Image (tube, helix red, strand yellow):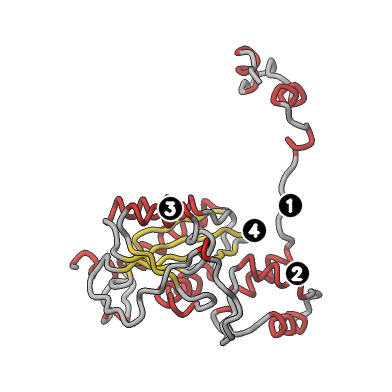
Amino acid sequence: MLIPTAERKAMVDSSDQALSITSQCDLLGLCRSSFYYKAVGESEENLAIMRYLDEQYFETPFYGVERILVSLVVKGYKINAKRLRRLMKLVGWQTLYPAPKTTNIDPTKYKYPYLLRNLAIERKNHVWGIDITYIPMKRGFLYLFAIIDLYTRYVVGWSISNTMTAEWCVDTISEAIGKYGKPEIMNSDQGSQFTSELYTQFLTEKNVQISMDGKGRAIDNIFIERLWRSVKYEHVYLYVYEDGLSLWKGLNSYFEFYNQVRPHQSLEYSTPSRLYLAA
């Protein structure tokens, strides 16, 4: 629909002459009720349960729905298995357990092999690991995406978002490549963002080999799982962030500390920054 110039200006004019909300919705063909609609967030109880799940995963990643349900009921929560499964999915809980092979992979949704088994990682930008995790806040939550150089443990890129999309991940990776160069191998889990055509085509065009963990095997990407544990226990759980801006500022300070100040036992108490720059 073509809207006259005068009316277009009125739609962005904050003066008394501006068009009413009703007129603006009519011009755009919108239902007025949709203009005022605000998405309903999670309840305070659900947010508390999600935070509990996020913390508990580092202690008992082998717990399934039934055990977690019992522990929550003991804590006084009135929750059923259906609701619990939904919240576990939101925080990205993947129960670790041995299971028979009962699923045949769809050949149209090809999953790339895991390339890190028995691989000696001996230089920077040899292998980067990526993953997404849930970050609780005082009201609501966001997702954190990070990229770590596995040889030096240097975090080469990160960002936060309220949705988990392939575009978000690719943009963050592209920025990291522009700043530090490209890796030889990129390792991830089999999440939908990392099996998407956008992600796989982007890395293929960059001549980066794609490696993927086995389904349900969080320990395959153990380096970034350790990063999540450090980020959450050393920072996120110690603060109650009000909004995305304060969370971004806090994480920005933490990753600078993690890269440049925090000594790593696995690096003989050197820092990722020192090792990455030296390499």
User: What whole-number distance in Å separates the C-alpha atoms at marks 2 and 3?
Assistant: 32 Å
> Which of the marked residues, 2 or 3, is nearer the chain's N terminus?
2
Of the two numbered discs 2 and 1 in the rendering, the one whose residue sits closer to the viewer: 2
Q: Is mark 4 on a helix, strand or loop?
A: loop
Of the two numbered discs 4 and 2 in the rendering, the one whose residue sits closer to the viewer: 2
Against 39, is 59 above or below? below
Asked if one can make out residue 74 in the rendered structure from this viewpoint, the answer is yes
Direction from residue 180 to residue 33 in the image, left or right: right
Instruction: Name the residue beneath numbered marker 1.
Output: 40
Q: What element carries label 1?
A: loop
Instruction: Name the residue beneath numbered marker 2.
Output: 83
Q: Quadrant of the N terminus?
A: top right
User: What whole-number distance in Å separates the C-alpha atoms at marks 3 and 4?
Assistant: 25 Å
Query: Which residue appears at 38% of the width and 58% of the height?
Result: 157
User: What whole-number distance in Å separates the C-alpha atoms at marks 2 and 1?
Assistant: 16 Å
> Which of the marked residues, 3 or 1, is nearer the chain's N terminus?
1
Q: Which amino acid does label 4 sit on?
A: Gly
Q: What residue type is labelled 2?
A: Arg
